[in-house]
Amino acid sequence: MKNSDREVINGNITLSYRVENFNFTNQTTINNTTANNETVSFSNFARMNPFYTKYNENGEIPKYVFSEGLGATPIWNPLWDFIQNSFNKSSNTGITDNFQFEWRATNQLRLRGSFQYSLNKLNTERFISPNETSQATKSELDRGQYTEGNTTSTSYNGRINATYGAFWGDHTFNAVGGMQFSQNSSKNSTFSAKGYLSDKFSNPNFSVGYPEGGKPSSADTKSRSVSFYANLNYAYAMRYLLDFNLSRNGASQFGIDDPFTNTWSVGLGWNVHNEKWFHNNKYISYLKLHASYGNPGNQNYDAKLASSIYNYTNEYINPFGLSALVSQWGNNWLEWQKTKTYNIGLTTTMFENKLSFNIDYQIRKSNPMLVRIQLPSSTGTTTAPMNIGGTDNRSVSVAATYYILRKGDLNWYVSANLNHNTTDYYNIGKTLEKYNKDGKDEAGKTEGRNLSKALTRMYDGASTTGLYAVRSAGIDPATGNEVFIRKDGTYTFEWDPEDEVLVGDTNPKFTGSFSTSLLYKGFSFGAAFTYRTGGDVVLSTLMDKVENIGKDQIKQNQDRRALTDRWKKPGDIAKYKRIDDHSVSHASSRFIATEHTIECSSINIGYRTTQWPFLRTMGMTSIDIRAYMNDIFRISNIKEERGIDYPFQRSFSLSIGLGF
């Protein structure tokens, strides 16, 4: 986007020191990013009808391009906002220090430790000129706004463990025991000032004051976790393998009555290729079978998930001090989300190591889930965290690599992978019925809401990515109205959320990628592609720019199908309802389609050499030249709007590496 830019500075220093059996390493990284972001979203230009003149007869940029007269809302010119002295900028500075040590006590025993500290400071400034069109309807002393935000984030991470490894004859044993801890904290503050008579001065000193009812705000969050773990590995003759992992984990995100949980896993492996009776196999050089079972945990949640949070306010003065309003109810009994994982798989290499192949089947059952359930607003807040039900995930993944050519300096191979997975809810009951019916009043009528736009639901046995909507039989040629199909199979012109059924699933049947790489002496070439097929998507463009167009939206740039493909007269066979109907088009199966997409995600070309004569003259040992291209093309049966909020970018980069 014009007038937007980004500057990045990175640097790191690594120091290593070794004495006898001790090894110390310290790495410090410093980075700074400054950015000037767009002040006018590209979507404002995309919404503008192309036939409006953005310049007047004198070549000047007017404030609006069309007005129906006194009292009517004009169509504002985004170019006018673009030339104002508004700005939207940010600065982000980060420092990370990572210290590591290792002590080789004996040939079998090693002690390792690490400590990492990181500090990140983010400053954002946004100034809206009083001359912008968004300020036109405000009083003179309310126009223009300055907002500044400052966030400081710090984190500490530490780890210490001991490793012991030994073998006796056919027996190999390894053990790892240790602990790790972490703390993450964040402080941020924000304030706004409003009322500027000119956009030549953005300093808050030139403002009238705070926005009406506004005041500075701040937040302080902190989370801690600790884990104690032990890992054991045993192998007999490198044929039969056994792994066992056990850990005790605690985190501040969970209720004070249950902050710790145990996780564990056990795995078995069989190296078939090491069996004596398998040694003479002409086709398979490596064959391993493996299986595992365990219950890893998950603590990637809000730092204050289990805590009740109150906001203090001075709006309600009382003799006892400041009043407090509930903003979040906590849950002292909140449990960890536990996931029981079953996995079986096979890895093999065949045909003189030309073909590598891997297949895995996995079952993941998470129970209990962590969700926010609906509460009556009379409790002071509308949601609360609870453990409810679980999810059942089943997946199959296949990966293969094949060397087409492998001779001397020439190597050419292709690789591909394929994934298929499904996830369903279970043991939910009717606790989340409020979510599924959100938006209905006591009489059972719909107020626009969840069932109208959002199509996801939480039912026992239902897919977590299922799409629920009322089925559509299309547009009636006689009236131009949409015909809906009830649950009992009868037809109606009335949309009723009680008739919704499963009409699709956003989860693709198959996803994956494939790539190729060619290496010849110092030259290299690589290309990578991704694909997905069978997933259903909601055609939001059809809902928002072909239908659901009111009188105000007509003034904006819309999809041409709103004119060419909508029903106009009796007998028309049309995809979209009659053109004079401005009522809300609810989500139905008519706006859902199955996607099949392939994308070229990257292409890279490179050359590395140590043979050029001038290298030694300049004191260099090698030169490495690389060129990268991203997002080359996208082929899909569904057209997708890209770059509406910010122009879509296909990037090209060139790098030169020098060795000394």
Image (cartoon, rainbow, N blue to C red):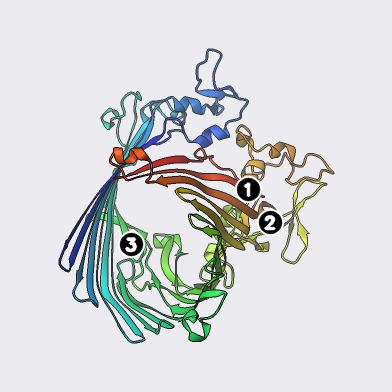
Q: Label 1 is placed on what type of residue?
A: Ile
Q: Is residue 233 above or below residue 331?
A: below
Q: Give neighbour class at mark 1: few <14, some 14-19, many 20+ (Cα, 10 Å).
A: few
The residue at which mark 1 appears reads as 635
SS at badge 3: loop
Q: Closer to the N terminus: mark 3 or mark 2?
A: 3
- Residue 114 placement (x, y as % from top left): 23, 64
Image position of 220 (left or right of 335): left
- Residue 384 placement (x, y as % from top left): 41, 64
Image position of 269 (left or right of 92): right
Residue 421 or residue 43, whichever sits in front: 421
Residue 451 or residue 608, whichever sits in front: 608
**Quadrant assignment for the C terminus:** top left
Q: CA distance from mark 1 to mark 2?
A: 24 Å
Q: Give neighbour class at mark 2: few <14, some 14-19, many 20+ (Cα, 10 Å).
A: many
Q: Label 3 is placed on what type of residue?
A: Lys
Q: Quadrant of residue 396?
A: bottom right
Q: Give neighbour class at mark 3: few <14, some 14-19, many 20+ (Cα, 10 Å).
A: some
Q: CA distance from mark 3 to mark 2?
A: 39 Å
Asked if residue 273 shows in the view, the reply is yes
* Numbered label attached to residue 589: 2
SS at badge 1: strand
Q: Nearer the viewer, mark 1 or mark 3?
A: 1
- Residue 520 placement (x, y as % from top left): 49, 51
* Numbered label attached to residue 304: 3
